[in-house]
Image (cartoon, rainbow, N blue to C red):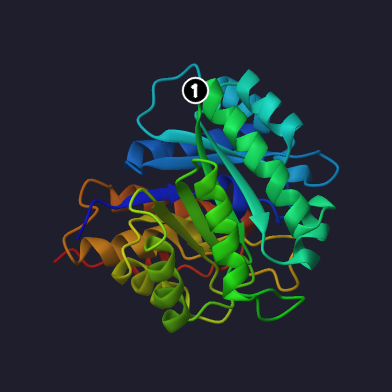
């Protein structure tokens, strides 16, 4: 198995749809534990208006504090526009995540722009981020289907990826925002995208809306994907899609990969502790499994 990159998105994607506010101090505790556990990238938050996603109101403060501390993980942040990138650069974001939906309906709900208009804007912003010296990952959201529109033409996704590649943007994620992906589709699409350029680095982001999250992870892995976005305890979901459902759980993914000999450098016990703390904080059972069942060590 090739070197795997785990991109923990719990502090952003995991928390963004939660109505119960999480204090900054509690977020810092979880983020530091994730860094200590050895995950490669931690997505701290998103640079959106606090009235739109109140849970992300302290993103600038979080980055400001964490940027002054020693850490092994790369700290990433989601930005939707130029103002978000400006805020991120001011507080020390190491890696920007910029995305465009393949669905016009989802795009309008998320950014108030059509997919094509958003694509042109994000490409320009991403090039500015690279010029600043920061890392950038661009994504196609709703790449495998849309909760509002249903099937998303695969050719549209390939065109968007092609636009990224033409702009010199090779770190590209496909996000299953609505959770519609199935393994055959995942294999087909990632195989086709890898054929577009030898320089492309693909990331996948799967929601477990219909119970196929982990199956889709392995389909992506078989298609050459080595970077995976997951969330502690399986928490999360886009508040601007039709059915809000959780992500593949980070601890479940790492447990599965460790059983095949990969991701041994990650402290699974620490990930499980974080997932349990998240579940206890919100006072409900989470969709992740390993933090409830325990993990196998043989």
- Considering only vertical position in the picture, is 64 above or below 268? above
The foreground one among 114 and 50 is 114
- Considering only vertical position in the picture, is 155 above or below 272? below
Q: Residue at x 70, y 55 (%)?
A: 18
Q: Residues within 10 Å of mark 1 (few under 14, many from 20)?
A: few
Furthest residue in direction top, as rendered: 68
Q: Is residue 106 left or right of residue 203?
A: right
Q: Quadrant of the N terminus?
A: bottom left
Q: Residue at x 38, y 54 (%)?
A: 197
In the rendered image, residue 29, in percent from the top left (x then y), is placed at 51, 36
In the rendered image, residue 140, in percent from the top left (x then y), is placed at 59, 58
Q: Residue at x 54, y 57 (%)?
A: 161
- Considering only vertical position in the picture, is 142 above or below 50? below
Q: Which residue is mark 1?
A: 133
In the rendered image, residue 63, in percent from the top left (x then y), is placed at 58, 26
The foreground one among 184 and 275 is 184
- Considering only vertical position in the picture, is 214 above or below 64? below
In the rendered image, residue 246, in percent from the top left (x then y), is placed at 58, 66
Q: From where the camera sits, is residue 30 visible?
A: no
Q: Residue at x 32, y 41 (%)?
A: 38
């Amino acid at each position: 198995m090739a070197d795997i990159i785990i991109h923990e998105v719990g502090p952003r994607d995991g928390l963004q749809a939660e109505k119960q506010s999480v204090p900054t101090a509690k977020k810092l505790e979880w983020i530091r534990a994730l860094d200590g556990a050895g995950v490669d990238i931690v997505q701290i938050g998103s640079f959106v208006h606090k009235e739109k996603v109140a849970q992300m109101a302290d993103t600038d403060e979080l980055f400001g504090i964490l940027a002054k501390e020693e850490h092994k993980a790369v700290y990433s942040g989601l930005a939707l526009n130029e103002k978000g990138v400006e805020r991120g650069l001011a507080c020390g974001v190491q890696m920007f995540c910029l995305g465009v939906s393949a669905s016009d309906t989802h795009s309008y709900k998320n950014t108030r722009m059509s997919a094509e208009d958003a694509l042109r804007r994000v490409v320009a912003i991403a090039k500015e981020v690279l010029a600043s010296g920061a890392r950038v990952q661009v994504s196609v959201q709703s790449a495998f289907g849309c909760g509002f529109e249903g099937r998303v033409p695969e050719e549209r996704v390939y065109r968007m990826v092609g636009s990224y590649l033409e702009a010199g943007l090779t770190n590209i994620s496909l996000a299953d925002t609505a959770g519609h992906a199935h393994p055959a589709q995942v294999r087909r699409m990632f195989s086709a995208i890898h054929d577009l350029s030898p320089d492309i680095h693909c990331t996948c982001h799967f929601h477990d809306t219909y119970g196929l999250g982990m199956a889709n992870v392995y389909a992506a892995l078989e298609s050459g994907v080595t970077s995976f976005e997951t969330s502690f305890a399986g928490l999360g979901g886009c508040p601007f899609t039709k059915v809000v459902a959780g992500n593949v759980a980070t601890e479940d993914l790492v447990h599965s990969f460790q059983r095949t000999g990969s991701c041994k450098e990650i402290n699974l016990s620490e990930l499980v502790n974080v997932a349990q703390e998240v579940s206890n904080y919100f006072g409900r059972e989470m969709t992740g499994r390993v933090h409830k069942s325990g993990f196998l060590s043989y």
